[in-house]
Structure formats: C-alpha cells, structure tokens
Amino acid sequence: MSQIFGKPLVTQEAMRARIKDLGKQISLDYQGKDLLVVGVLKGAYVFFADLVRVIRLPIQIDFLIAKSHKAIGSPAKKVKVWSELTEKINNRHVLLVEDIVDSGVTAQFLVKNLMKKKPSSVAVCALISKPANRKVEVDLRYVGFEVPPTYLVGYGLDFKQKYRNLPYLAKLDPKLVQEDSQS
Ligand code: IMP
Ligand code: MG
C-alpha cells in the first residue's frame, strides 16, 4: 500500500514527537481536574490511542461515532451521531479528540450537543486542521498539524473507508477526490 502514496506528509517520528507535546500540554492544563477524553470514531482511533498514552493523568475515556455527509441537493454537510457516550459528563471536563477539522461542521455540532449535558468544559483536540476550509467557527484548543486544503489519508483517515490503517499521513491523488465528488 505504501507504494501508492509515496513519502509520508508527516513522518511517524514527527507525529510521535508532536503527540507527546500535546500530551504534556494536556496533562498540565487538566492537572487536578476530572477529565473525560472522548474519541470521535472512526477517524480518531489511531490518534486517540497514541494521545491517551502520553497523557499523565488518571483520565477516563469514551467514544462517539459520528459521520458527516453531504445532503442530497445541498452542498452543506450534515452530521449524524451513531452512538451515545457511556459515561456521564455533567460537571466534568470533556476533551473531544478529532482526527481532522475541515469545514468545522462536525466539531461544532458535537461540541454544541455535548454542552447541552452541562459539562464543566468542552475543549477540542484535533490531530489535523485545515483552516483554509473552515465554514463555521470552532475553537480548537489543541492542534497537531495545520495543513493546506488537500485530501489526506492514513493514520485513521479514510477515503471511501479505506487506507485508515496506513501507518502515516499521506496526500491522496487529487484526481481521485475530484472524480469521487463528481460521481
Ligand atoms: P468537517 O465537518 O468538514 O470539519 O469534516 C470533518 C470530517 O470530514 C472528519 O472527521 C473526516 O472524517 C472528514 N475529512 C475531512 N477532511 C478529510 C481528509 O482530508 N481526509 C479524510 N477525511 C477527511
Ligand atoms: Mg471520515
């Protein structure tokens, strides 16, 4: 599979170093606080596993399954949440872990939904942000890497549900994305 994508956009070493920094910062910021770290599946599963292992606090973990899709006949994305949290978040600090924030629609939707349950705080940690594509405002407390608006796969990120298991982040051939958006 690696022959298809060539060189990684972010090497595994750079990724490990950046995630370690994020873990240190999160450990400092939430010291003495009751923190629930929530991974957004499927995309965040690889990043999530790496991140929680460099947070040096007695955190709890939970997951949400979310899917964003374009509504037929509309360019706007809709977000569908497939699962509920199993932990209570009332009066607790929540850190939402996202693979990538693109338009911001998914992250904004999830934060708004979580806020309804009256947590002490909700912050977002995204491995990747594409600020040039932002359509709605979303406050990202922690960002691994900011990238230009190109389509990425690997390290949890998919194209048509494939390539999530590629062990590094790579650019997908723009022709493939173009063909798909026209189909
Ligand atoms: P947003 O709602 O536009 O911010 O999009 C967030 C979701 O779209 C992410 O959680 C991903 O599932 C998907 N996504 C956005 N950009 C990419 C990409 O470059 N590669 C793979 N998935 C992406
Ligand atoms: Mg996805």
Image (spheres, rainbow, N blue to C red):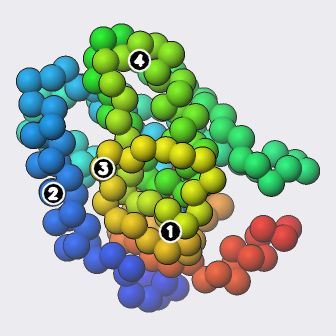
Residue at 30% over, 11% down: 91
Residue 39 appears in the picture as rendered: yes
Q: Amino acid at mark 4?
A: Thr
How far apart are labels 4 and 2 at the CA level?
29 Å
How far apart are labels 2 and 1 at the CA level?
23 Å
For disc 4, the marked residue is 86
For disc 2, the marked residue is 21
Does the residue tagged 1 have its C-beta within 8 Å of any atom of ligand 1? yes
For disc 3, the marked residue is 142
Mark 2, secondary structure of its residue:
helix
How far apart are labels 2 and 3 at the CA level?
10 Å
Of the two numbered discs 2 and 1 on the same chain, state the one appearing first in sequence: 2
Q: With respect to residue 26, does 127 lie above or below?
A: below
Does the residue tagged 3 have its C-beta within 8 Å of any atom of ligand 1? no
Closer to the eye: label 2 or 1: 2
Does the residue tagged 4 have its C-beta within 8 Å of any atom of ligand 1? no
For disc 1, the marked residue is 153
Mark 3, secondary structure of its residue:
strand
Query: Would you say the residues marked 2 and 1 are in contact, meaning their CB atoms lie under 8 Å apart?
Result: no
